[in-house]
Image: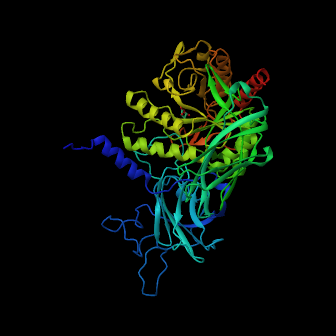
Amino acid sequence: MMQIKPTLAFLLILFGLLSNQANSQNLFTNVYGRQVTSLNGEWQYIIDPYETGFFDYRFKEKGERDPGAYWNSGVPWDKTAMIEHGYSDKQTLNVPGDWNSQDRVFLYYEGTVWYKKSFDYQKDAATNRVFLYFGAVNYQADVYLNGKKLGTHKGGFTPFQFEIDAGLLKEKDNFVVVKVDNKRHKDEVPTVNTDWWNYGGITRDVLLVETPEVFVEDYFIKLNSPTASLKPSMKKAEITGWVKLNGAKIGEPVTIEIPELKAKTTINYTGSVASFSMNLKKVKLWSDNNPKRYELVISTSQDQLRDKIGLRKIEVSGKDILLNGKSVFLRGICMHEEYPVEMRRATSKLDALKLLGWAQDLNCNFVRLAHYPHNEHIVRAADSLGMLLWSEIPVYWTIDFGNPEVLEKAKVQLNEMITRDRNRPSIIVWSVGNETPVSPTRTEFMKNLVLKAKELDDSRLVSAALEVHYNKDKNIINDPLGAYTDIVSVNEYLGWYVGLPSYCQTAQWETVYNKPLIFSETGAGAKGGYLADSLTRWSEEYQEWFYKEQVEMMKRMPENYTGLTPWILVDFRSPKRNNPTYQEGWNRKGLIDEKGNKKKAFFVLKRYYEELESNNP
Ligand code: GCB
């Protein structure tokens, strides 16, 4: 008889899958197109560094009905009640928002905070379903409704949701409690060491989402016409895609419609997804020059979901990046999801427009969203402005590459990022990480992520920011991960971490890959308003000189040089930056300072991009 012995690796992977799927459920796409009720606003909180609300005095998880558990409201049942916690309007935090910027006690806090919000809710129809959706919570969220656990989610930058059992939701006096824990751990993604602020809290929108029993969960639409036929305005085009329903029976009809193009097709649901293709007439393609969007309507017998999509094609041909069949140069900049003027996470559409407005002012057509998926407002604003985007998961520096559980965690985040944004035309690159140190284990890990990204979305380019060990003379880009990515992207700081900016004058660059090459970072620190001569570090003049030399070097790059995203649009908070005169907890490589003032180097890059744009309209 054959015996099956599970190998250790298999068990580890299985354990990984189980432990980190936690129990957030299938994510739906396009949450803002659905029937939603916002739970944003003031939430009451308890700060709980010892996790007293979660563990008993023997450090075991408290029982569900334990009145001392902080997922229970802490309201005394009578005057004899012995209760040592409670929620009050004396302590509130704004959602969405990080806690660090809302009260001085939270500035460096890493640990548990309990959030509570009460609400009434009346469903439109008794048979409708209700989900509790979080745009993001950093890092681990344990979610409870009316004292009952809905589930857990890990990962600080991607959305998740739980369905609320019909019997649990009341018309009056519901309360949701979220235990938020932003402690850093070696085996999480990201790991303990990053060059950004570990903002904790419910940092993105919280929504109640009401759906019919059978609803459109997810869909994907892409332009399928051959490259040779692509023109900004096309007589005809072909699109293909799929729709995934939740709760549907096989045979359920699904209609996909783009009213402006008078295009409509009805297909029958086949069980996993329903695939379709459509021929369109008189189509305008979405591009950075003309971000034309069309309304898309997907309907079933019970549900109707609307979105604004853009039709465009992004691909690589030899050394070129082609947008709609035409070679495009990516005039880019990196940015964090942070609004520096108020020293906080960027959370709103207004913040998005401010940040992307700065990038537009710099003459960019491309933004690298570093180093984690940014909020959906930023991506939707980029769709409407025609800003191309790079979106990344926080596989940053030295995460635990040998650990199969960590790989599963990275894959979960990749899946959540792609599920949310697969239909956003602005995103042209999925990035699977940043500056990961070369070794066979790490390359295998990263290759797995590249393949996973392609499996989830075969219509975009996949890349990762690589490190290059530079010197004054020859710099060879040969990281083995470059063999698997569509674009080879490298970070280089010649003239900042190595030597002076004049080193750029003799630097030669070579790559072993016949692929498009992007410089995904370069930069130098300067304190806004500090003026000196160009040899003085931290002065605006040094940074200006750095940019001038970098630009001249870029002009001598091999012909596969197809884009640049310097580090970084705006100064950002980082606890690693402790020079007491110039940094004071800020990474000063911004082209704009923390007050919103443009530094001298801003104008050097702006001029270069103007030149590039006029050469490549
Ligand atoms: C890098 C990292 C980025 C840092 C930057 C710096 O290479 O990718 O996260 O903030 O350098 O300022 O050193």
Q: Quadrant of ligand 1?
A: top right
Q: Is residue 229 visible?
A: yes
Percent position (x, y) of residue 408? 42, 44
The structure's colour scheme is rainbow
The image quadrant where one finds the C terminus is top right
Percent position (x, y) of residue 113? 49, 61
Q: Is residue 329 visible?
A: no
Q: Is residue 444 above or below residue 35?
A: above
The image quadrant where one finds the N terminus is top left
- Between 589 and 335, the residue placed more toward the observer is 335
- In the image, taking residue 370 as reference, residue 378 lies left or right, namely right
Instruction: Single out the residue that lies furthest toward the left.
Output: 1
Which residue does the image show at 64% across and 54% down from the upper left?
Answer: 253
Examine the image and state in which quarter residue 41 appears. bottom right
Percent position (x, y) of residue 185? 41, 47
The mark total stands at 0
Percent position (x, y) of residue 407? 42, 41
Examine the image and state in which quarter residue 429 appears. top right
- In the image, taking residue 426 as reference, residue 142 lies left or right, namely left
Q: Is residue 410 above or below residue 233?
A: below
- Between 116 and 265, the residue placed more toward the observer is 265
- Between 254 and 512, the residue placed more toward the observer is 254
Q: Is residue 466 above or below residue 280?
A: above
- Between 32 and 115, the residue placed more toward the observer is 32
- In the image, taking residue 346 as reference, residue 163 lies left or right, namely left
